[in-house]
Amino acid sequence: MISTLIVDDEPLARENLLLRLASDETFDICGQADNGHDALLLASALAPDVIFLDIQMPGMDGLEAAEEIRKSCNAVIIFVTAYNEHALEAFRVNALDYLVKPIDDDQFHETLGRIKKRV
């Protein structure tokens, strides 16, 4: 099982990821957060294998959260955002992938394959 944390300030976006991941028994959702600060706490407490992380959130954004998470957790980071202009910054913090909302099904399945190879 690949323990998975989902972080997005939009409940529908979290639900979308939950539904997509439910079709693959490899992924176990260990937690959810709606902001960067809670993402840090959950990442530290749960040590997930992968984190699906939104970028634009109130307070601490996903890029800031990813930088902090990297200091204490070896989770694979997948950014999921409506904005493509942050891609270079995302890869600077060693993101495995960068998905733009609305998420393309084929790209999502390719990402899951990359995660399985990495984890």
Image (cartoon, rainbow, N blue to C red):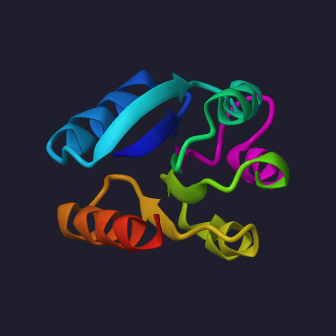
Q: Quick check: 33 left or right of 37?
A: left
Q: Quick check: 93 left or right of 9?
A: right
Which residues lie in the magenta part?
Answer: 52-69
Return the residue nearer the eye: 6 or 87.
6
Residue at the image point whose x is 69% and y is 27% from the top: 45
- The answer to whether residue 29 is magenta is no
Return the residue nearer the eye: 118 or 35.
118
Spot occupied by residue 93 in the image (x, y as percentages of width and height): 74, 67
Vertical comparison of 40 with 116: above or below: above
Return the residue nearer the eye: 56 or 118.
118
Image quarter (top left, top right, bottom left or bottom right) of the N terminus: top left
Spot occupied by residue 20 in the image (x, y as percentages of width and height): 22, 44
Residue at the image point whose x is 30% and y is 70% from the top: 113
How many marks on residues? 0
Residue reaching furthest to the front? 1
Quadrant hosting residue 28: top left
Spot occupied by residue 80 in the image (x, y as percentages of width and height): 48, 53
Return the residue nearer the eye: 37 or 74.
74
Residue at the image point whose x is 61% and y is 71% from the top: 87
Residue reaching furthest to the left? 23
Residue at the image point whose x is 42% and y is 23% from the top: 11
Spot occupied by residue 95 in the image (x, y as percentages of width and height): 61, 67
Quadrant hosting residue 85: bottom right
- The answer to whether residue 54 is magenta is yes
